[in-house]
Amino acid sequence: MNLRFIPISDLKDDNVSIFSQYKENQLVHYCEPDLGIFIAESPKVIQRALDAGYAPLSFLVEDKTIESREASELWDRLGRMTSQDDIPINVDDSVKADSGKDVMSGESGSGEGCSVTIKKGDNDCYVPVYVGDMKLLSEITGFKLTRGVLCAMKRRPLPDVKELCRDLSRIAVLENVVNPTNVGAIFRSAAALNIDAVLLTSGCSDPLYRRAARVSMGTVFQIPWTYISSDGTNSFWPESGMQLLKDMGFRTAAMALRDRSVSIDHPVLMKEPKLAIILGTEGEGLMDETINACDYVVKIPMSHGVDSLNVAAASAVVFWQLGQKGVTCHNR
C-alpha cells in the first residue's frame, strides 16, 4: 500500500473535513447507503483495527509524531500491505478514471456511497497522510491527540446475533450504556477476562466511537460484538431480546441489587454452561422489566457500606469471576 504524506496548514482544507467538521454520529451515516466511517486514534488502536480487517481511508498526524517508534511501525506495516493482503482495499472505476478524485468528497447521505477514499495520482493509488503541527491539530480535534495519529476507517458489516453467539458460553449484554468511556472499559475487561462476545442494546454508545475504541485499547476490534436488535429500535429490548437470549440457550444474569440477588461466586451460577451477563446504564442500572425476566439477579459482595460500583468497574469484577467457565468457587 502506498502512502502519501501531505502537509496541511489550514483548517479549511477540505481533505481533513471528516476529522474536523463531522460529529461521530454523522460519520456513521456519511456514506449512505454504504456503511459509514469511524475515526481510530493512536497507532496501537489503528494496528488492532487493521488486524481485524478494517480498511484505512486517510490519516491525520502530528508532525512531531510521524517518526515516533509506534508511528514508524504503523507506516512500515502499511507499506508492506497490498490490496490482496490484510485488508480489502478496492479502487472503484471512478477513481481509476479521474486522477486526484477523492471519493469521500461527496455530501453525507448523498446516496452515492463511498467505497474508498484512497486517491489516484502519478499512476499509483495511495492513502493520504495529512500532516500538521500540534497547535493546528488541537484546533481541529478539540483536544490533544493520543500518540498523535488519527485514522479514518471504513466500517464493516456487523454479524448476525445468532451466528455470533453460536457455540459461545459466556457473553456480556450492555443495556443502554451511553458513556463511550464506560463502553470502552467494559470491552477491555471482557477481552481480558474470558468473555466470548458483547451484545449491545440500541441505546448504547457505539463501540467504534473514538473515545470508546481508545479507552478499550483497541479491544473493540478483538472481541466479537453486535447489536442485539437487528432493526436498531428500542422496542426490541427487553422482551424480544431476552427471549432471543433464551432461545439461543443462555441463562441470564442481571447485575442488580434485589432481595433475591445471589453472590457472583454462587456455585450454581458458576456451573451454568451458557450464561449471558447483563449490565445496565450508568446511574439507574437495569430496567425492572429486564431484571424480572432474568434467571438470576447477581451482586458483588462489598464492604464499608458501599452498595454499587461504576458499571465499568463492576464488569471487570463479574467477568473475572464468571469468566472462569465451569469453575466452582466456595462462597465467601
Image: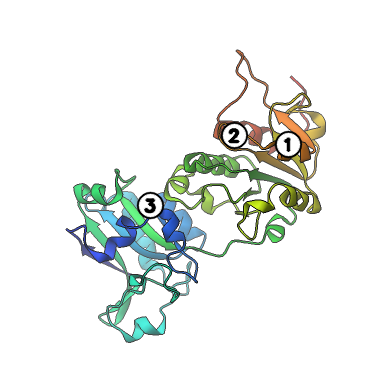
Q: For the residues carrying marks 1 and 3, which lies nearer the camera in this image?
A: 1
* Mark 1 neighbour class, 10 Å CA radius: few under 14, some 14 to 19, many 20 or more: many
CB under 8 Å between callouts 1 and 2?
A: no
Q: How far apart are marks 3 and 2 (CA)?
A: 25 Å
Question: Secondary structure beneath disc 1?
Answer: helix
Tell me which label, 1 or 3, sits earlier in the chain. 3
Q: What residue type is labelled 3?
A: Pro
Q: What residue type is labelled 2?
A: Ala
Tell me which label, 3 or 2, sits earlier in the chain. 3
Task: Give the number of the disc on residue 43.
Answer: 3
Q: In this view, does 202 lie above or below 158?
A: above
Q: Which residue is drawn at 40% across and 67% down?
A: 108
Q: Which residue is drawn at 52% across and 64% down?
A: 156
Q: What residue type is labelled 1?
A: Ile
Instruction: Indicate the quadrant where residue 91 lies.
Output: bottom left
- The image position of residue 197, as x and y in percent, is 64, 50
Q: In which quarter of the image is the C terminus?
A: top right
Task: Please name the residue that numbered disc 2 is placed on.
Answer: 316
Tell me which label, 1 or 2, sits earlier in the chain. 1
Q: In which quarter of the image is the N terminus?
A: bottom left
- The image position of residue 288, as x and y in percent, is 71, 36
Task: Give the number of the disc on residue 291.
Answer: 1
Q: Could you say which is closer to the camera, residue 38 or residue 272? A: 38
Give the left or right position of residue 236, taking residue 27 as reference: right
